[in-house]
Amino acid sequence: MVGYNNMFVSDGISRYPLLDWKLTWQIDDESNNLDRRFGWLGENDYLYSLCGHDEDSTDAKRTVNTEFHLSQPTVPLITYSEPHDGGSIEKNKSLYHKGDTAVFIAHPSKDYKFENWTENNTSISTSDTLSFIVSTSRSLFANFIKLVPIVINSYSSPLNGGIVEKNRSVYYKGDTVVLIAKPSIDYKFQNWTENNIAISSSDTLIFVADKDRTISSNFMKATSLSVYSNPIDGGIVEKNRSVYYKGDTAVLIAKPSNDYKFQNWSESNVVISKSDSLTFIVNNDRAITANFSIPSSIWDDDIKMESILKHDMFHKTLTINSNYDTDGILIYDLLGNIRFAAKQIKVVNLENLPIGVYIVSISLKNENISKNILIVN
């Protein structure tokens, strides 16, 4: 048996075998020349090695079974990190051939972040993972950016007014900053200020970090709006809200209990309104009292009886003092039946009323109240 081990390389570069060919041809025992019948291998196929042995030989000729190992060329894929210490590149293979899938993953170093992949100074991807089918040689750059720390200081004013939540603890140039103001109990968020200038009234502030900044989250404490009923069982006061802040509109409505009527609103013992509904803008702490009273008969108050109503029993008339503006007058019998009704009248003729006891109710516009009178006709 004669053995052969010959190395052939078509382009001067050693290759790795990818596929195998098995050929059989005849060899001249005297000249050891290969039979030319097998022809030339394709231009993209590379002969790596030749190993053979005899199977049948004669004096002149012998047949040799020979195994050819063929290989396609590797495709150079060169990668760079820019800058060199900006990060590393992870590859899914060490060598690539035409038709392979190449996967490159860029890993930034500390204080760097990945920016993009470029080829021939042209950006081809902003994803840190680059995948493609190998077809030709390429030179690829993974570009990294040095992270520049940006200081974002935030604080609450007043300190116990609330807190500020950040979307991250450290910011670098180009990062998105998200600040959220969260007020404490009895406080509400007012605005964000920078260098004493208001920059937003939304409780969430979003911006791109491009420079060091100091930002204040301002909170407002609720005002104290105390309301009282006088007397306590005289009625209640309804509010349009439970908590008031500076600038809010307060609406207070007095609702008297049975057998009581609303009289007025007072603050620091000074009457501020006689309407049962009080509306004002809150700008400081206040204590307001809703005053109620039990309706009283003018006859029970001799001074008022003399000043408001004059009963002339001889002429059977009731005369209302012209200094008082009446909204109306009603006269009831003891069964509750209305025997007389009139508006904006000064003199009431009682001649048509039978002798008896009547109740006269007068509504005075300037006091917005009704008064009862017992009369005997």
Image (cartoon, rainbow, N blue to C red):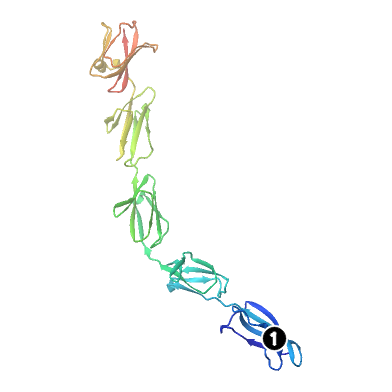
Query: Could one spot residue 109 in this view of the protein?
Result: no
Instruction: Indicate the position of residue 32 as horizontal and vertical percent values.
Output: 68, 91
Q: Which residue is mark 1?
A: 52
The quarter of the picture where the C terminus appears is top left
Query: What's under tag 1, amino acid-wise?
Result: Gly
Question: Along the line of sight, which residue is nearer the eye, 316 or 57?
Answer: 57
Instruction: Indicate the position of residue 203 as horizontal and vertical percent values.
Output: 38, 49
- Vertical comparison of 321 with 138: above or below: above
Question: Along the line of sight, which residue is nearer the eye, 276 or 346?
Answer: 346
Question: Along the line of sight, which residue is nearer the eye, 31 or 37?
Answer: 37
Apparent side of residue 75 relative to residue 271 in the rendered image (left or right): right
The quarter of the picture where the N terminus appears is bottom right
Quadrant of residue 333 within the rendered picture: top left
Query: Could one spot residue 62 in this view of the protein?
Result: yes
Instruction: Indicate the position of residue 270 as horizontal and vertical percent values.
Output: 26, 31
Quadrant of residue 39 within the rendered picture: bottom right
Q: Judging from the image, what secondary structure is the residue with disc 1 in?
A: strand
Question: Along the line of sight, which residue is nearer the eye, 351 or 55?
Answer: 55
Instruction: Indicate the position of residue 313 as horizontal and vertical percent values.
Output: 27, 7
Task: Determine the residue positioned at 26% across, 6% down.
Answer: 315
Task: Determine the residue positioned at 49% across, 71% down.
Answer: 89
